[in-house]
Image (tube, rainbow, N blue to C red):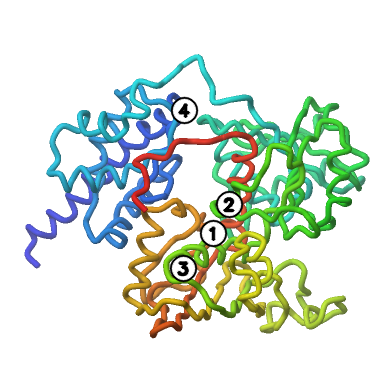
Amino acid sequence: MSQQPLDTVFQEWHDNQATAEQLIPLIGLLYRRNNVVTTLYGRSLFNRSVIRILKDHRFVRKVEGTELSVQDTYPLVKAMTELDLGPAHVDVGKLGVAFKKQGGGDARAFLEKELADIVGRHDPEGTNGEPQDVVLYGFGRIGRILARVLVEKAGGGNLLRLRAIVVRGRGDIAKDLEKRASLLRRDSVHGPFNGTIQVDVEARTLTANGNVIQVIYADSPAEVDYTAYGIDNAVVVDNTGIWRDEAGLGQHLQCKGAAKAILTAPGKGEIKNIVFGINDGDIAAEDTILSAASCTTNAIVPVLKVLNDEYGISNGHVETVHAYTNDQNLIDNYHKGDRRGRSAPLNMVLTETGAAKAVAKALPELGGKLTGNAIRVPTPNVSMAILNLTLETETDAASLNDYLRRMSIDSAYQKQIDYVDSPEVVSSDFVGNRHAGIVDAKATIANGKHAVLYVWYDNEFGYSCQVVRILQHISNVHFLKLPRAQA
């Protein structure tokens, strides 16, 4: 390659960096002033780095087969800031591809047509509703990731306010608070917290990016009065897993200031197990206790739903290859569960999963059609579900993958189903992925009515994002999504 082309490529990269830097304040302005959340094929652009924005533009080539650069999207985002937009989630990537396909032209005129539902709808005095207080009961792996997501989403019309966390402890409060802050600040899997965290020992609070979070010490829900901290009508998210039935979780509702409870584990009895995007329509206004089901159930149900809609599922088996969890032992020791007492970092551990049976709670049409099992493996995060299915309609791998790709980018399940078509991806590549599950297209096997699909999922972060979506739903935080899905 001659020197001139080399210089040209480098200059193009420099120009794209400069344009991405100009995009960032515009994206922030739309978020804070207009409550407009900009995305690029489902990937949020708000609060992202220059390099991340450039990488997400490259991602479009993989899903659409066409190049999209910041030079294509910048004029659209700039025009959006001039259109007095009302609240919405706007996929700038899809708009950019559509704009290119029509040959470009007047960006403002194009947007006035594509975003007609929100053009001129900005109300500087109005809001989307009353802020919703959220309390995290338990501050372990899921609790801390939920805190990160809630803090990140604060503002921009989201309305969810993380007001408190409830933890056990009666010892050295100053030391305890510092440890809680440190665990939120640094994470061996998910990296450092994106922002600042301050500790106020006297007030017993953590302030994360301006969000003041009360730390409440209690050994049981009966000890807590949320109104004493100015918290009212709160949704309590129980991350402990200690109580999974209505009687146990109902303890939260006896607390002053608490109105609803969400369990971040499969619920028992008559508790509704909700997989957001699939059966959240079953949530009634009078429901005060809900379950967000399990991470595995959230990963597989959206994929099973779209497969059953298109091809029909006669029967199948779900094998979960799951990262080890805190429930297991680091080294061999007594454990009440079978095999879980053996060292988690040193063994593959065959164990049970209720995910296959739990599918029927979200998709009754698949009741009795699936079996399941699980293997815990020596990785700290990111799991995989292998769906071995007998379909009612014949297909092949190419057709099946093309259908799932379309579902991932242009359907109502865009935030639940992601799609990857790379021969080199491994589990660590999906740390921090916000989708419920990610279809690995290269691994798909399909022959006639027999299909095997491999679905990755970040069993911590992706699941936590599903929980937050339920929180938004029951708190009446609803955004129009534009451009409208085609499938």
Q: From mark 4 to mark 1, how far is it between C-alphas?
A: 27 Å
First-in-chain label (4 vs 2):
4
Numbered tag placed on residue 362 in the rendering? none
Question: What residue did someone put label 1 on?
Answer: 436
Residue at the spot 71% in from the left edge and 53% down from the top edge: 272
Disc 4 vs disc 3: which is toward the camera?
3
Q: Is residue 295 above or below residue 312?
A: above
Query: What residue lies at 67% left-to-right and 77% top-to-bottom?
Result: 376
Q: Position of residue 101 (x, y in %)?
A: 17, 48
Residue 388 coordinates in the image, percent (x, y): 52, 80
- Alpha carbon distance from label 1 to label 2: 9 Å
Q: Residues within 10 Å of mark 2 (few under 14, many from 20)?
A: many
Query: Marks 4 and 2, Cα distance to the nearest angstrom?
Result: 26 Å
| Residue 32's disc number | 4
What residue is shown with label 2? 276
The answer to whether one can see residue 53 in this image is yes
Quadrant in the picture for residue 261: top right
Q: Earlier in the sequence, mark 1 or mark 3?
A: 3
* Amino acid type, callout 2: Phe
Can you identify the residue that label 3 sits on? 307
Nearer the camera: disc 1 or disc 3: 3
Do tag 1 and tag 2 residues touch (Cβ < 8 Å)? yes
The answer to which of 348 and 34 lies nearer the viewer is 34
Q: Identify the secondary structure beneath mark 4.
A: helix
Occupied quadrant, residue 205: top right
